[in-house]
Image (cartoon, rainbow, N blue to C red):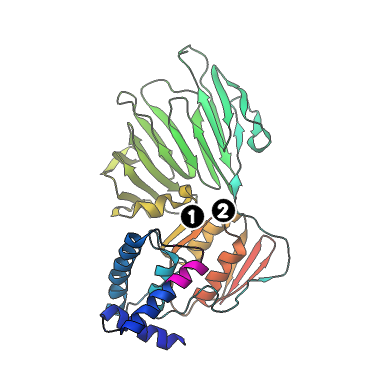
Amino acid sequence: MNKESINALIEKYLNGTSSREETAWVEQWLDERSRQSGWNWKDEVHKKEVRKEIFDKIEDKIGAAKPLKQKWLMPVYQLTAAAALLLTLAIGWWFLPGHKENKVLQTSVKAVKPGTKAATLQLGSGEVIDLDDQAAGILGHSGDVKISKIAGGLIQYNAGNNLSSAKIVENTLSIPRGGQYQITLSDGTNVWLNSETKLFYPNRFTGKERRVRIVGEAYFDVAKNVNLPFVVESEGMDIRVTGTEFNISAYKGAETATTLIEGSVEVSHQGNRYMNLVPGEQAYRKSETEMKKLKVDVNNAISWKKGYFSFDYLSLEEVMNEISRWYDIDYKIIGKPKNQDKLGGTFSREKSIDELLAYIEQLVNVKIVRKERSVTIMY
């Protein structure tokens, strides 16, 4: 059955005009595609929930033409792969895993692996510790604070009950491209750091506030202390909390965004208070003078922490920026697109880069050539 026939059949299915045989065919097709994609319905209730969500999303898409098309890279969060495939067909894009062989041209057979747990720790003394080479256990001390490495990509600072007057020194945790790590600070705050990120923090906190600085992206689960506010300095945005969970993305040369998951935060810039956020809101700084408050799906902001990419109406360049940090590649785009296509959807960060690039090649109608860690995208 060709694309046009399937689209027509799906429209009948959505409108409730399909025959019993046609309805059975669509549902069987969904189940087959689900198995081929490595996804399965959890149970009949899950299948019904997804089917309802399909109806809502497809009917919205079919309603009217839009100036910018959003192409789904992989299933949207909370949808199975089969559901997303049905959505893709119904809005006119032919993107089915296994429909045709579409491999990224490789001029080198050397594989590029996904990112892993990798980081270096610089102590106040100037000593640099490569955490990849260290076994679990005590790494050393920074002042009077014990530093330990826990299995699974976590380092932990423990100040104990010792509130001595030992010198406070700044430590730096650096995550390379293709890396990710977690740290527990001396106050009990947990921080997850994404690729190409640096966290600057004291070995222990004293004074009237707990202050750290971030370049890159991190998720903070701040230990509650109403008497000692926690302040995160970033590129053009300061975040002040007493105990909460939030994600901040503050890469150099890019927009800064703080997304609140739980609790409340106060956002300021150069000492001037801008706004307070409640869960589900994002402070978005596009320029030196422009900052907005947005309602967002927090799952998109914290997807990296959960092990997948989540792209929501992003340009190819924005998508490639995220991909290049995780897979530690360089890329260049040759030519310009005819249409301002936007990409959306999810993709596991454990998959190979060639698999991901192959999907992009299909969706955006480009040719992609990879030579080891160099990727060229040609319109």
Q: Quadrant of residue 264?
A: top left
Q: Quadrant of residue 273?
A: top left
Quarter the C terminus occupies: bottom right
Question: What x and y, as percent, mark residue 359?
Answer: 54, 70
Q: Is residue 69 left or right of residue 273?
A: right
Q: Which secondary structure, mark 1?
A: strand
Q: Which residue appears at 57% of the width and 38% of the height? A: 153
Question: What x and y, as percent, mark residue 5?
Answer: 41, 88
Is there any visible trace of residue 236 in the rendered image? no
Q: Which residue appears at 57% of the width and 25% of the height? A: 147
Of circles 2 and 1, the one toward us is 1
Query: Tag 1 or tag 2, which sits nearer the N-term?
Result: 1
The kind of residue tagged 1 is: Tyr
Part of the protein shown in magenta: 31-40
Considering only vertical position in the picture, is 275 above or below 308? above
Q: Which residue appears at 38% of the width and 73% of the height? A: 87
Q: Which residue is mark 2?
A: 326
Q: Which residue is mark 1?
A: 308
Considering only vertical position in the picture, is 35 above or below 5? above
Residue 37 within the segment the image draws in magenta: yes
Q: Which secondary structure, mark 2?
A: helix
Observer-nearest residue: 156 or 258? 156
Is there any visible trace of residue 128 in the rendered image? yes
Residue 245 within the segment the image draws in magenta: no
Q: Is residue 53 left or right of residue 133?
A: left
The kind of residue tagged 2 is: Trp
Observer-nearest residue: 171 or 151? 151
